[in-house]
Structures are given as structure tokens and as C-alpha cells.
Image: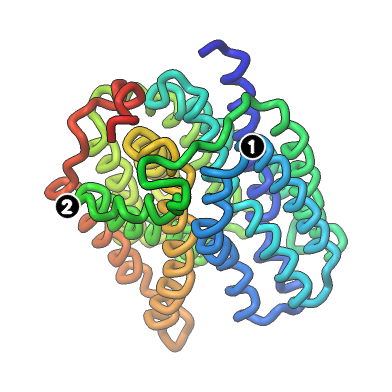
Amino acid sequence: MNQGPRFKLFLMMVLEIAIWGAWQVQIFNYMPMLKFEQWQQNLAGSMFGIASVVGIFFSNQFADRNFSAEKFLAFSHGVGGLALIGAALAKEFTPFFLCFLLYGLFYVPTISVTNAVAFAHLKDPARDFGLVRMGGTVGWIVVSWPLIFLLSANSTVTEMRWIFLVGAMISFALAAFSLTLPHTPPKKAGEGGAETLAWLEAAKLLAVPYVLILFIVTLIDSTIHNGYFVLIGGFLRNPINMPDNWIAAITTIGQVAEIVTMVILGSVLKKIGWKWTMILGILGHCLRFATFAFFDKPEYQGLIVAVQVLHGICYAFFFATLYIFVDAVFPKDIRTSAQGLFNLLVLGAGLVIANFWFGSLKAQWTDANGVVNYHKLFLVPTGLAVAAMLLLLLFFKPPTVRPQEAGASASAH
């Protein structure tokens, strides 16, 4: 395809993920300012999981079968922007959570839809999707880094509310910009008939062995991926002894590395294929968590900071490859729902399990003096990563078609 549409798709991804990045980095600093209880903060932190469940049954169905994607994006981001303004103005938990949840119900499905729009207009998704999706990483960095450094623990509630107001402004901008995107019409149902639900057709493909294995592996990898974000702040603070104002910046090193990894993703996919690319992505998790487990001392600060670059491999080589694979293998009329099915794990189940399970393990392995046994704690995701790699290695047998050929043959699956 020519550079004009591809740049539009890139900018779409910039704005899409920038909305998320505006509030994500600072929300857990903001909620205590409003005196929200811990369970309320946990519930708000699990919002994406709730929205993912609802999205797979309703929103993704509409995007697949009923509305053009660009109009769906415009409407969803318009409503989502209004909901973020409501969240910014709310002072009590109930109105805050209702507005935040409303935002999530309209925002989370758009992650799958933007993927679907990109795939629909990329001539060679295996080659080009990484470059387009890199826009999301750029958007996250561009919006979150200024907010990290401008807003601190000493900021007022009024100042902190800008995390939602900035997100709302970007959401409105994307709502307008979506109407300029290439037309992506809804797909008619296949031979199953017009009454067939897209999400149900997507779920039926779990009966295919390699899809089921990938589904299980995605649940495992999503859990440990989200577990990283649950545990990393406390780990860097103590025992690694990083200053509080450095922690957010250190965790974004991986996002810079993600840009580089996205650039080479297409070449890696074409050279080694689906299975080995995803195994490399999970290997990144394994190496990172093993490093945390065995080098959990202040004298290894440099090493702990350096392994943050593995985040790029973890995300691009597994999750971005997963989205490309779903587009290549699933039938056209259910691809948005199929993306939503896997996002149910990435943004939903994996997030919720990580929040509660790793939080519980951390409490269980904290002694009377408040010292966490991070060696023992980080061996858990390390072991899970090894198990996920073995599942892919031994049981994941995807179609023999090479990634660069998948676009031409996807309709045959």
C-alpha cells in the first residue's frame, strides 16, 4: 500500500494508545488522593477486565457485522471522551467508577477494532503491522512521559485530574480523525447464516487444537505480563533501592525498546515463523523474571535496569504476533470478535488474575518486618513462562503457510 493510508493507520495507533497512556501511569497515585479504599482501587484497576468481557459479547459483534469500523471508532471515542471528563470531575467512588467503567466499555473494544482496521488495509500484515502498531508505543511515550515528570506525589487533586482530561481531549481528536480513515465495512456472516453471532463463531474455533493451545498460552503469558506491572514498582523501591521519582522512568525503558522490536518484527516473522517468534517473546519474560529472582540485590541495579529492554521482545514477539496470527487465520467476518476473544485474556482475565493472585502471593511471602521474598515470588512467573514455552514447542502446530503468505490464504481457513 502507499505511504498515505499507512501513515493514517500509524497515527490512528498513536492516538488510540495515547488515550490509555494518559491516565494509566498516574491513576494509582490519583485514587488515594480521593481517599478510595484499597478494594475500590483494585476494582477500578480491574475495569479493563470487566469491559473486555462485555465487549466480546456486544461491541465486537457490532463492529464485525453491523457498523463500518471507522464510524464505530468515532462514536466509541466520542462517548469515551465524555466519560473520561465525568471521571475527572467525580469526587466520590461510585460516580467515578461508573464513569470510568463507561469509558472502558466503549474504549476496550476499539483496541480490537483498530487492529482490524489496520489489517484490512495492509497489503502485507506480517511485514507492516509491527511498523503501524509501533505508533501505539510512540503515543504512550509521548503522552505519559510528560505527565510522569509534571505530576508528582506533591501534585494536588485538581492537577492530577488532567490525566483524564488529557485522555478525553485525545479521545475526541481520535473520534474526529476516525472519520478520515479508509472505509472498513462490516463483514457479512458466512455460511452459518446472518443470525450467527460473531463471538460465538470465534469461540467455536477453540475446538481447533492449535487455537486452543494458543488460547491457553495467551492466558499464561497475559497473567505474567500483567504480573510484571503489579510487582515491579515495589521491587525497584525495595530491595533494589531505586528512588521513587526514577521508578516510572525505568519501567518505560521497555517501551523504547518496543519501538525497535516492532521495526524488526516483520523480518523475524518471515524468517522463523509464528511458533518460534512467539516462543522468543515468552523467553523474554522468562529471562527478565529469572534475573529479578536471582539478582534481587541493590548491587545489581544496573542489571535490573538493563533487562527492562526485554519488554520490547515480550510484547512485540508474542502479543503483536498473536494479533497478526489471528487476522491471518480467522475468517474475515469474525476477526474483530476473534481479536476481542484474545483481548479478553490480554486485557481481561490475565489482568484480573495478576492483580489478585500476585498481590496475594506478595502478601503471603512478606515477613513480619515487611520484607518481601522476591526471589521466591519471581520464580513463579519464571516457571509459568517455561511452561508456556513448552506448550508452544510441543503442541502448537499452526497452519503450514508462512506469515508472508497468510494474507493471501486467510480466507481459506
Disc 2 marks which amino acid?
Answer: Leu
The CA span between labels 2 and 1 is 34 Å
Label drawn at residue 139: 1
Quadrant in the picture for the C terminus: top left
Decide if residue 141 is in sight here. Answer: no
**For residue 315, which quarter of the picture?**
top left
**For residue 8, which quarter of the picture?**
top right
Q: Residues within 10 Å of mark 1 (few under 14, many from 20)?
A: many
Q: Residue at x 48, y 38 (%)?
A: 188
Labels 2 and 1: the sequence-earlier one? 1
Q: Which residue is mark 2?
A: 390
52 sits left or right of 40 in the view: left
Q: What kind of colouring is applied to the model shown?
A: rainbow
| Residue farthest to the left, as pictured | 394
Query: Where is 292 relative to 93, above or below?
Result: above
Q: What kind of element bears circle 1?
A: helix
| Residue farthest to the bottom, as pictured | 368
Q: Residues within 10 Å of mark 2 (few under 14, many from 20)?
A: some
Residue 252 placement (x, y as % from top left): 55, 45
